């Protein structure tokens, strides 16, 4: 850690420029806010076919970071008395249905914000560009399968945030996009944040890219469906994203002094609500954990060929943001974030130490675990627990060719029922075993999502 912000940011920029090509990323924008000072920069190009230079004003899709904007709007409506955190969805949407009636009747706004609903969450469903897109989407959720009982544990749920978007609509009497403009974007002064591609097309914006044998190629489609806007529809520049981060570091007032939330509500959003494993938990739309003993709130976002990351250390008055236009961007973003935290704050995450256990302990975890789009099989190989992943179909469309399955990965036990990926493309990821009330293994959580155990493995 140094005491010179200019030097720290210059070093960060040099690292990005020197390494982005190796990650197959055509364009990147990064920014740091620290103790009242904001610095940002862009590198590379927006589009390999029609290249324009990336700057700090270039617009990128931020994907699921949008969920925290949706959560912020919900908290504003709660303070206005238009929503209640522990009210059921049916209080506002009497016809709400998913496949499990008990869940449909009991799910609350808190469950939606904390990803503890338990049904299949990766429901990417285009219902058109009309103002009724969210209403149609929520109606079409009526057959979504329940993978784990309501409020049993965390399982990342995209569709829950489209339900929140619909709740915002019915309680404000306007569209989700207009409500977000009035509740969040405009009062925070976020003038370069958009949902509508028609507004973006007049500005400098980035397109997504996918890796290929001939280098990065343009990803299609560019925009997401309107029904997914509350999940991941915001398009903005790095400076708007850092301005938004400053609000969540603050006391609930916008930069012009207008109070948008009480300090209590803002803090409550960042308070652990649902434990995941170890030091990991989820707050109200935010991922909450710690690094080197410091509280960290964060969210990542991925769309087709674009990836973004926002990391906030509130007690240190620090935020880091990165936007990329390559499909490996989510991994490179974590690398850059780790470097930024080390340079500016001296914070460094360390891999957990594996526990040395007998093979029979690991054998208990073996078996096939499934969810739509993806299977995870745990097997014993050479005395080690190994994970094999199979993608079954395109998770964004529900059809088409699935992604290629990655090579097998070794899993280390780091605490009871908590595993750590020791090698491969997902090195550093956590895998959690979830037990039923009788103590038997019922589920596995990988990629933040629940997979149902289909059978126990054999030696």
Image (cartoon, helix red, strand yellow):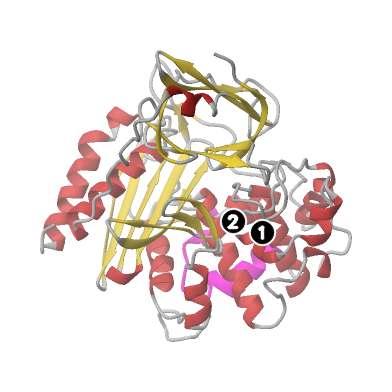
Q: Nearer the viewer, residue 374 or 190?
A: 374
Q: Secondary structure at mark 2?
A: loop
Query: Element under label 1?
Result: helix
Q: Nearer the viewer, mark 1 or mark 2?
A: 1
Q: CA distance from mark 1 to mark 2?
A: 22 Å
Asked whether residue 318 is in view, the answer is yes
Residue 201 in view of the camera:
no
Q: Indicate whether 355 appears above or below 390.
A: below
Q: In the rendered structure, which disc, 1 or 2, sits on the residue that comes first in sequence?
A: 1
Write the start and end of the magenta stretch as one range: 175-201
Q: Position of residue 66 (x, y in %)?
A: 54, 57
- Identified at 54% across, 29% down, the residue is 365
Quarter containing the C terminus: top right
On residue 179, the disc is: none
Rendering coords of residue 176 (x, y %): 68, 63
Is disc 2 surrounded by few (<14), some (14 to 19) or many (20+) residues within 10 Å? many
Foreground of the two, 343 or 456: 456
From the viewer's perspective, is 339 left or right of 132? left
In the rendered structure, the answer to whether residue 113 lies left or right of residue 296 reads right
Which quadrant of the figure has residue 415?
Answer: top left
Which residue is rendered at x = 15% and y = 55% of the image? 8
Which residue is more in the foreground, 252 or 175? Answer: 252
Name the residue beneath numbered marker 1: 112
Q: Is residue 259 above or below residue 313?
A: below
Q: Which residue is mark 2?
A: 195
User: Which quarter of the figure is the N terminus placed in?
Assistant: bottom left
* Residue sitting at x 36%, y 34%: 25
Q: Position of residue 404 (x, y in %)?
A: 53, 19
| Residue 195 counted in the magenta span | yes
């Amino acid at each position: 850690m140094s005491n010179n912000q200019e030097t720290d940011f210059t070093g960060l920029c040099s690292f990005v420029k020197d390494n982005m090509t190796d990650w197959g990323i055509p364009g990147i924008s990064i920014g740091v806010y620290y103790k009242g000072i904001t610095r940002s920069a862009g590198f590379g190009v927006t589009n390999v076919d029609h290249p324009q230079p990336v700057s700090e004003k270039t617009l990128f899709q931020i994907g699921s970071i949008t969920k925290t904007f949706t959560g912020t709007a919900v908290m504003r409506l709660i303070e206005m008395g238009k929503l209640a955190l522990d009210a059921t969805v049916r209080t506002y949407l009497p016809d709400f249905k998913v496949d499990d009636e008990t869940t449909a009747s009991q799910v609350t706004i808190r469950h939606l914000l904390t990803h503890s609903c338990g049904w299949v969450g990766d429901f990417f469903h285009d219902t058109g560009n009309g103002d009724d897109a969210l209403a149609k989407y929520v109606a079409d959720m009526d057959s979504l399968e329940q993978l784990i009982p309501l409020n049993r544990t965390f399982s990342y749920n995209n569709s829950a945030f489209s339900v929140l978007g619909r709740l915002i609509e019915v309680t404000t009497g306007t569209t989700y996009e207009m409500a977000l403009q009035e509740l969040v974007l405009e009062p925070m002064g976020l003038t370069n944040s958009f949902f509508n591609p028609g507004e973006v097309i007049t500005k400098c914006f980035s397109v997504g890219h996918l890796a290929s044998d001939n280098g990065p190629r343009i990803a299609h489609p560019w925009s997401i469906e309107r029904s997914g806007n509350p999940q991941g529809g915001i398009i903005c520049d790095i400076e708007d994203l850092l301005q938004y981060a400053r609000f969540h570091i603050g006391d609930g007032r916008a930069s012009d002094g207008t109070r948008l939330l009480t300090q209590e509500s803002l803090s409550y959003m960042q308070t652990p609500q649902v434990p995941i494993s170890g030091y990991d938990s989820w707050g109200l739309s935010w991922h909450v954990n710690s690094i080197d003993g410091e509280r960290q709130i964060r969210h990542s976002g991925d769309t087709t060929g674009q990836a973004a990351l926002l990391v906030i250390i509130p007690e240190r008055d620090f935020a880091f943001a990165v936007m990329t236009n390559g499909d490996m961007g989510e991994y490179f973003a974590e690398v850059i974030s780790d470097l930024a935290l080390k340079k500016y704050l001296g914070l460094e995450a360390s891999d957990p130490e594996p526990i040395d256990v007998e093979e029979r302990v690991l054998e208990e975890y073996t078996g096939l675990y499934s969810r739509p789009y993806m299977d995870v099989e745990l097997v014993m190989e050479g005395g080690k627990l190994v994970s094999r992943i199979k993608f079954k179909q395109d998770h964004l469309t529900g059809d088409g060719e699935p992604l290629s399955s990655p090579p097998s990965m070794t899993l280390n036990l780091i605490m009871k029922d908590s595993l750590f990926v020791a090698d491969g493309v997902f090195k550093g990821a956590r895998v959690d075993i979830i037990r039923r009330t009788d103590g038997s293994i019922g589920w596995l959580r990988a990629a933040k999502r629940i997979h149902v155990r289909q059978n126990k493995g054999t030696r």
